[in-house]
Image: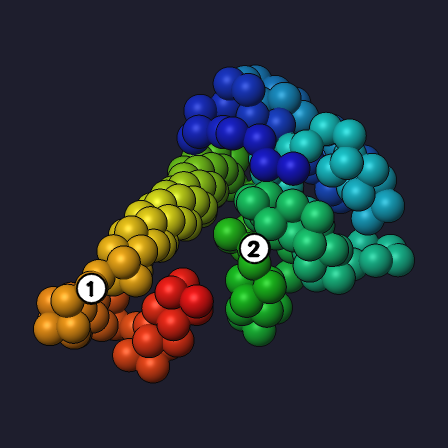
């Protein structure tokens, strides 16, 4: 489920996932002071429960956790909510791990102890990017619907014109006039002459 959000904390829910209670509490206090609504989870199972019940827009997730790791959790949450903005946290600066997280869909990768100013900026950036992605997808869906509607209308108008033209041709008594009209109809509709001839024959009995 996609919930609207801007880069502003108001109305934005952040899910903090970390097996260390002290870190969960510290991040919760900081984010609450900034104005975010915060949910906290100690493991992947709790995180998935909060994802279903709270529909957060952002998730801060520790990489190294007992059981399911943050890297293993990442694709699972994105499968449920592709618009979720995810910031990964780790105490170990490993470039390969950072690259893997970003490839899997994380917005950013922050090193513990987290610089709070950096975290605030990263959150704002992730939310802006998230909103841009949501807006882009919504626009693409709207355009696809518009094209489908216009295409259907055009097909209906073309069918109506073809119906009228064929009826007129079927009723025509003058051979030369019929041939000229048929040639023009073939050119305008792009339909095979044989098909139109067969349809005319059917209509005239």
Q: Which residue is mark 1?
A: 173
Q: Is disc 2 placed on a helix, strand or loop?
A: loop
Q: Is residue 198 left or right of residue 94?
A: left
Q: Does residue 95 lie above or below 62 as drawn?
A: below
Going 11% across and 73% down the picture, which residue do you hit?
176
The x, y position of residue 80, in whole percent, is 70, 48
Q: Does residue 59 lie above or below 196 as drawn?
A: above
Estimate how packed mark 1 is, as few (under 14), some (14 to 19) or many (20 or more) residues with alpha carbons within 10 Å: few
Pick the front one: 178 or 87: 178
Looking at the image, tell me whether mark 1 or mark 2 is earlier in sequence order: 2
Residue 125: image quadrant is top left
Residue 37: image quadrant is top right
Going 75% across and 61% down the picture, which residue do you hit?
72
Q: Which mark is residue 106?
A: 2
Q: Which mark is residue 190?
A: none
Q: Give the spatial CA distance, label 1 vs label 2.
A: 73 Å
């Amino acid at each position: 489920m996609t919930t609207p959000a801007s880069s502003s904390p108001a109305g934005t829910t952040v899910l903090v996932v970390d097996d260390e209670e002290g870190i969960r509490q510290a991040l919760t206090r900081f984010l609450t002071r900034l104005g975010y609504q915060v949910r906290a989870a100690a493991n992947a199972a709790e995180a998935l429960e909060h994802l279903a019940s709270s529909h957060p827009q952002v998730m801060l997730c520790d990489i190294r956790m007992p059981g399911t790791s943050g890297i293993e959790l990442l694709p699972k949450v994105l499968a449920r909510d592709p618009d979720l903005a995810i910031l990964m946290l780790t105490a170990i600066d490993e470039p390969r791990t950072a690259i893997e997280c970003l490839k899997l869909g994380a917005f950013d990768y922050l090193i513990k102890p987290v610089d709070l100013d950096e975290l605030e900026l990263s959150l704002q950036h992730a939310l802006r990017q998230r909103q841009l992605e949501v807006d882009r997808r919504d626009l693409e869906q709207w355009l696809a619907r518009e094209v489908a509607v216009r295409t259907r209308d055009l097909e209906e108008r073309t069918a109506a014109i073809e119906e009228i033209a064929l009826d007129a041709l079927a009723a025509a008594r003058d051979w030369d006039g019929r041939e000229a009209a048929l040639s023009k109809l073939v050119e305008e509709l792009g339909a095979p002459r044989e098909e139109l001839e067969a349809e005319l024959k059917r209509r005239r009995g």
